[in-house]
Every structure is written in structure tokens, then in C-alpha cells.
């Protein structure tokens, strides 16, 4: 009974936090599945993660150069690098290589279109898909976009259950 009450209390707290956060962060933008063949033009490439061989936090973002000033990654500046003005084919190839870095098996990649909030396209998000049996599951990263005052902030975190799994495995399995 006590555990059930704690879980319900935690769930209620999360709802309140996300509601407050949603108001303060701005308008949430929803990505949609994209065909890599539709990626044309020139892009600035933002490469996130790949800090050590067993890292599961890999993501790449192809951002149209004319909208690059609108984008801000809400992560430490040392956790990503930027390559500017790459042709689409080269940017996509480098993004694909980046999200496959490390020792973990990547079964596929996900390509998502990032809206700019006014009906256009800001760019594309490329994420790895791991085997479902991997620690952290197929899609461990939670990437979200918020539009506020003409700026798009990209939030990159591990899903909470993934963080718990990783912590549990690195600390010897205790709870």
C-alpha cells in the first residue's frame, strides 16, 4: 500500500512539473518521420554525444543554415560540435557515422523532420535505434523542441527509466 501511494504521489508530481515546465518552456514542436531521400540542400551539422565507447547518447541534427541562429542546444557546450555549410549528402553521411559510433550495436537510424514553428522545416534529427534487448532499450534518448521568443531550444536527456537502468547496472544491480 505504501509503495502504491509513493508511485501515485510521484506520478502526480511529474504531471505538475511537466505542466509548469510546458508553460515556461514555450510551444512544444512535434517531429515527424522523414525520408532521408528528401534531405537536400546545405546544412549545419550538430553532433551530440559519442563521448566514450559505451555511450548511448548519440544524436545528430541537420539544421538549415538560415535558421541556425534560432537553435540552442540545452546541453553543455562541450558535449557537441558543429560543422557548418555541408552539402546534404555529406551532412547525412557524417550524421549516420556519428550516431553509430562506439561499441554498441545500432540496428537502424531514425530520421525525423524538425518543424520551425511556422509551417517550415528547421532541419532533421538523426538518432540511433539499438536492439530492444540492449540496456536502455531501442530509443534511450528523449529529444524535445520548444519554441519561445523566436528561438528553438533542443532538450536532450535520457528517458528516466533508462537512467535508472544504467545507474542500477553501473552500481552493481542494487536498488
Image (tube, rainbow, N blue to C red):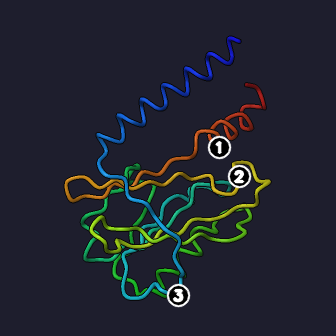
Q: Which residue is mark 3?
A: 37
Nearer-the-camera pick, 24 or 172: 24
Q: Residue 61: where, in percent of width, then height?
A: 44, 68
N-terminal-most mark, 3 or 2: 3
On the rendered structure, is 40 left or right of 100?
Answer: left
Decide: marks 2, 1 in contact (CB < 8 A)? yes
Compare residues 101 and 157 and report the one nearer the observer.
157
**Vertical arrangement, residue 28 with respect to residue 100, above or below:** above
Q: Residue at x 36, y 38 (%)?
A: 21
Q: Quadrant of residue 100?
A: bottom right
Residue at point 46%, 84% (across, down): 39
Q: Which image quarter is the C terminus in?
A: top right
Q: Quadrant of residue 64?
A: bottom left
Residue corresponding to mark 2: 137
Find the residue positioned furthest to the left.
Answer: 149
Q: Is residue 106 above or below residue 22?
A: below
Q: Residues within 10 Å of mark 2 (few under 14, many from 20)?
A: some
Q: Residues within 10 Å of mark 3 (few under 14, many from 20)?
A: few
Residue identified by numbered label 1: 162
Amino acid at each position: 500500500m505504501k509503495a502504491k501511494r509513493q508511485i501515485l504521489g510521484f506520478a502526480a508530481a511529474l504531471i505538475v512539473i511537466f505542466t509548469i515546465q510546458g508553460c515556461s518552456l514555450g510551444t512544444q514542436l512535434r517531429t515527424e518521420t522523414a525520408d532521408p531521400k528528401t534531405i537536400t540542400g546545405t546544412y549545419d551539422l550538430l553532433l551530440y554525444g559519442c563521448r566514450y565507447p559505451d555511450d548511448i547518447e548519440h544524436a545528430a541534427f541537420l539544421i538549415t543554415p538560415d535558421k541556425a541562429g534560432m537553435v540552442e542546444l540545452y546541453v553543455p557546450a562541450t558535449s557537441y560540435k558543429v560543422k557548418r555549410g555541408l552539402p546534404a549528402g555529406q551532412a547525412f553521411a557524417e550524421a549516420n557515422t556519428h550516431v553509430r559510433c562506439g561499441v554498441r550495436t545500432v540496428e537502424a537510424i531514425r530520421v525525423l523532420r524538425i518543424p520551425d514553428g511556422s509551417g517550415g522545416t528547421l532541419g532533421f534529427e538523426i538518432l540511433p535505434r539499438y536492439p530492444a534487448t540492449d540496456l536502455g532499450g531501442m530509443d534511450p534518448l528523449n529529444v524535445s523542441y520548444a519554441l519561445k521568443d523566436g528561438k528553438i531550444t533542443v532538450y536532450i536527456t535520457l528517458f528516466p527509466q533508462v537512467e535508472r537502468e544504467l545507474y542500477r547496472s553501473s552500481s552493481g544491480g542494487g536498488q
